[in-house]
Image: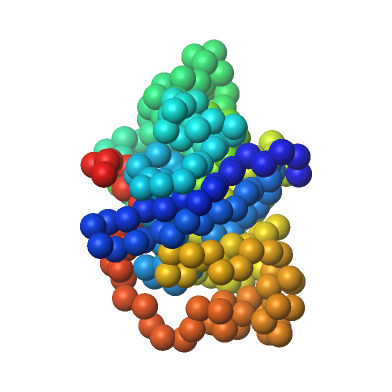
Amino acid sequence: MGKNIIEVKKLSKKFKDFLAVDEISFEVGQGEIFAFLGPNGAGKSTSIKMLTTLLRPSGGEVKINGFDILKNERDVLSSFGIVFQDPSVDGELTAYENMYFHAVLYGVKKTERKKKIQSLLEMVELIEKKDVLVKNFSGGMKRRLEIARGFLHHPEIIFLDEPTLGLDPQTRNKIWDYVKKINKNEGTTIFFTTHYMAEVEKVADRVAIIDNGKIIKIGTVEEINNLTGKNNLEDSFLHLTGKNIREEGAEPSGMMRRMARR
């Protein structure tokens, strides 16, 4: 890893009387696979929305690829791709049309569009389905298309918000194969959330655990397990965050493409 491609300093977000994110600070190195974990309502979705300019911070500073998220929003937006927790592909378009629209939106050169789209659809094993309407795709196929689309404009960073949620083990493994391949071949930084701790153990270089709006631990899986005295990340996670069930919606839920700035 080289420079820090994500730099977060004392980042906060308050909704009326509720402090969703409380002065968190961390860095992510270029080319790193970084897992951002927390129970429901811990502050992770709110944090990601701020990192990706969907939500304005109440305080603190964030730099993405060296650009301030408030002062250089256009440069920030061109630096990352994102796979939303909620489906974001257009079911009334074909796989190829979804990719082409994204390529135009992100300014991929006209001479490169067809080649890049074909290469990525081949990587996620959807090239034979490129002319099929996405509404006829399975959940796993849609997720694979979203992964391909997120990498289309060759971003420095890809944000994955629970990319394998609800998928069978075979599809989950395939998706991580694609992500690791891009990370290795292109040096793309991967920032992801998940509730599948086994995935984190397999792919993450480092892990940050957030709870009640504060980051409580950052380190490798081995370092966190050593600190807690546990044998696996799930046990360490429960040790650090407790075993009580958290309610959905304690923080603004779902990654939304369009939302009012606050």
Residue 97: x and y in percent read 38, 30
Question: Which residue corresponds to the image point at 27% horizontal and 56% vertical from the top-left?
Answer: 15
Looking at the rendered image, the quarter that the C terminus falls into is top left
Camera-side residue of 98 and 60: 60
Q: Residue at x 31, y 76 (%)?
A: 247
Indicate the colouring scheme.
rainbow
- The image position of residue 47, as x and y in percent, is 44, 53
Where 18 sits versus 152, above or below?
below
Q: Does 88 sit left or right of 178 as displayed? A: left
Q: Residue furthest top?
A: 111
In the rendered view, does 234 fall on the left or right side of 102? right
Instruction: Give left or right: position of 79 versus 262.
Output: right
Q: Quadrant of the N terminus?
A: top right
Give residue 119's position: percent from left, percent from top.
59, 32
Vertical arrangement, residue 110 with respect to residue 156, above or below = above
* Residue 83 in view here: no
Q: Nearer the viewer, residue 31 or 74?
A: 74
Mark yes or no: residue 223 visible. yes
Q: Is residue 246 above or below residue 195?
A: below
Q: Name the image quarter holding residue 234.
A: bottom right
- Residue 240, horizontal then vertical, whole percent: 56, 79
Q: Is residue 47 above or below residue 41?
A: above
How many numbered callouts?
A: 0
**Residue at x 70%, y 78% (from the top left corner):** 227
Residue at (27% x, 41% y) in the render = 261
